[in-house]
């Protein structure tokens, strides 16, 4: 009986309802969160306004509701459903801007923030999700590069780690887009073209963490912004202020072996990206003996981020279930 009561009260708490004050006033809205430090709760009205109310001013029944077990769980701790978010028309990924990391932000070792900035600027230009900065394209690009470099802890001598990148992207949404949008991220080390193509769709910010191999063998990591990818290996991506087109081809395959990355098991296949438009690329890249390699043993990966835009400003719900990005049940 106690368990049933707790679940019922939690459902009532997180549903739209009429909140009543001890003085007889009322307000219709949805509980967002409580703040134990100042004894207040926040309610989101149907008009999108967030109202802060002193718990002591609520009716006895409402005070009991917000102080019951599980009442401290915010609406943001519950997955939302599609009605909490705007429907996004399928955007044109060919409109993804071509920008160079050398022009904005911290310049050197800035490929991680720069790869994500391609998508932030694209979302801004297509009306999917505005960058909260006034100014023209260059002003926004400079602002967002510098901000993400700081959030991602990007260093000129060592670049950015994947964990720092994901934390930086999350911080941007929490600090600069609070109440406007939320997001989901995923890192996938299965680099087969048919798997890669699944993520390069719609408004997804899809980035490829690959290996640049120079002769004699010298490897370093680099992130690019993926415009398109097909199951048969055709690929288009942006980096260094250029649009690269090419094809993913098997370089070394060990069909009976797998690479163990922690508890992740993926096919032990190394690929190279054979570029088909060398004359369109920077001279320093054309003239160098460089290979673009995808190797799970080097921790190369697909990094994808999907934005969810709240239907009302002041939204707090978690992103809804997504079969592409949610962990696969074991």
Image (spheres, grey):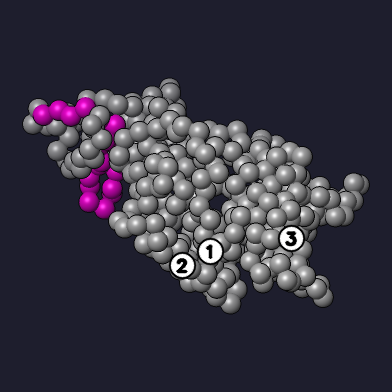
Q: Which residue is mark 2?
A: 104
Quarter containing the N terminus? top left
The residue positioned 26% from the left and 25% from the top of the image is 17
Q: Relative to residue 117, is residue 48 depicted above or below?
A: above
Q: Is residue 150 left or right of residue 249?
A: left
The span shown in magenta is 25-44
Residue situated in front as seen by the camera: 129 or 317: 129
Labels 1 & 2 near each other (Cβ < 8 A): yes
Find the distance from the CA under tag 3 to the CA under tag 2. 24 Å
Q: Residues within 10 Å of mark 2 (few under 14, many from 20)?
A: many
In the picture of the structure, the residue carrying the numbered disc 1 is 100
The answer to which image quadrant residue 13 occupies is: top left
Q: Cα distance, mark 1 to mark 3? A: 18 Å
State how far apart marks 1 and 2 are (Cα). Answer: 7 Å
Query: Is disc 1 placed on a helix, strand or loop?
Result: loop
Asked if one can make out residue 259 in the rendered structure from this viewpoint, the answer is: no
Q: To which residue does mark 3 refer? A: 292
Q: Position of residue 153 (x, y in %)?
A: 50, 68
Residue 299 painted magenta: no
């Amino acid at each position: 009986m106690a368990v049933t009561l707790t679940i019922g009260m939690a459902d009532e708490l997180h549903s739209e309802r009429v909140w009543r004050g001890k003085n007889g006033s009322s307000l219709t809205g949805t509980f967002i969160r409580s703040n134990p430090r100042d004894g207040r709760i926040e309610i989101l009205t149907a008009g999108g306004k967030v109202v802060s109310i002193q718990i002591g001013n609520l009716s006895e029944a409402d005070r009991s509701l917000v102080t019951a077990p599980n009442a401290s769980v915010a609406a943001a701790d519950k997955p939302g459903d599609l009605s909490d978010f705007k429907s996004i028309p399928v955007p044109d990924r060919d409109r993804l801007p071509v920008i160079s990391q050398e022009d904005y932000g911290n310049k050197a070792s800035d490929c991680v923030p720069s790869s994500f900035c391609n998508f932030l600027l694209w979302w801004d230009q297509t009306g999917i999700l505005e960058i909260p900065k006034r100014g023209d394209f260059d002003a926004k690009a400079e602002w967002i590069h510098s901000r993400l470099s700081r959030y991602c802890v990007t260093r000129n001598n060592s670049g950015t780690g994947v964990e720092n990148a994901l934390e930086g992207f999350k911080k941007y949404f929490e600090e600069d887009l609070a109440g406007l949008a939320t997001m989901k991220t995923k890192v996938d080390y299965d680099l087969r073209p048919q798997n890669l193509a699944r993520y390069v769709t719609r408004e997804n910010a899809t980035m490829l963490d690959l290996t640049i191999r120079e002769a004699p063998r010298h490897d370093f990591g680099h992130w690019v912004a993926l415009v398109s990818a097909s199951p048969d290996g055709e690929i288009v991506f942006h980096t260094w202020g250029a649009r690269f087109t090419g094809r993913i081809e098997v370089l070394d395959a060990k069909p009976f072996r797998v690479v163990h990355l922690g508890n992740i098991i993926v096919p032990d296949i190394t690929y190279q990206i054979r570029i088909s438009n060398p004359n369109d690329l920077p001279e320093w890249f054309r003239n160098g003996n460089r290979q673009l390699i995808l190797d799970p043993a080097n921790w190369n990966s697909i990094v994808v981020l999907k934005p969810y835009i709240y239907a009302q400003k002041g939204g707090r719900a978690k992103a809804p279930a997504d079969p592409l990005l949610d962990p696969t049940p074991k």
